[in-house]
Image (cartoon, grey):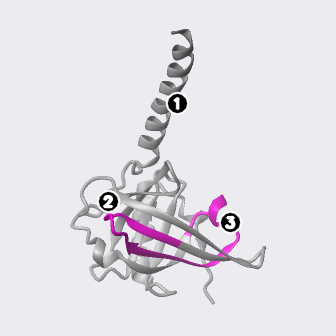
Amino acid sequence: MKNIHKIAIPVSVGVLGLLVFNYYSVRIPKGAVAVTHFDAEKYLGRWYEIARFDYKFEKDMDNVTATYSQNSDGSIRVDNKGYNYVKKAWEESIGEAKFVKAPTEGRLKVSFFKPIWSGYNVIDIDENYQYALVAGNSLKYLWILSRTTEIPESIKQRFLEKAKKIGYNIDELIWVKHN
């Protein structure tokens, strides 16, 4: 009986810790609101990363794209690619995204290393699904995406104003080069 307690208690604490961690990792930043009437079908396809904050998974990357496609189980395949100009090599990461709530709300969770999930929140998108502003689970993660390697100045300013109003330090954005 003592051996069961020695195993059950640490496992229970570990599972509880993982549940709490996943809850906080898929949240949306305070002040941000995910797009409603989100159309996942329109969102699928290739997106070019226009701007982002610098963090370890995309450090030293240019020519970054994200391609989203439907999996047979209803989840979304995430295929991120970019050129690491320091290592002089292309890098790719395949992940999976699922809706946090209804598929009509732009709140998703994404995982590249299961069972760890992160928030992926579409907080602004144009009516033609050509430009998107995506927030992570905190003010450390933000992406501006486009269907092409450029973005109109009016959309860029709209996204920057929204991000700044939420509390993002937009001066720290990295503007991704595409060639």
Q: Position of residue 159 (x, y in %)?
A: 41, 70
Residue at point 63% right, 66% down?
A: 58
- Report the front residue among 61 and 125: 61
Q: Position of residue 142 (x, y in %)?
A: 50, 62
| Crowd rating for badge 3 (residues with CA inside 10 Å; few <14, some 14–19, many 20+) | few
Query: In the image, is residue 118 above or below residue 71?
Result: above
Q: Earlier in the sequence, mark 3 or mark 2?
A: 2
Indicate whether residue 68 is drawn in magenta: yes
Indicate whether residue 161 is drawn in magenta: no
Q: What's the distance in space between the residues labelled 3 and 1, CA to CA? A: 31 Å
- Report the front residue among 55 and 39: 39
**Residue under numbered circle 1:** 14
Residue at point 33% right, 80% down?
A: 129
Q: Earlier in the sequence, mark 3 or mark 1?
A: 1
User: Any mark on residue 34, and which?
Assistant: 2
Q: Amino acid at mark 3?
A: Lys
Residue 31 vs residue 85: left or right?
left
- Report the front residue among 112 and 174: 112
Residue 7 vs residue 137: left or right?
right
Instruction: Please state the extent of the stretch shown in magenta in the rendering.
Output: 52-79
Q: Amino acid at mark 2?
A: Ala
Give SS at disc 2.
loop
The quarter holding residue 56 reads bottom right
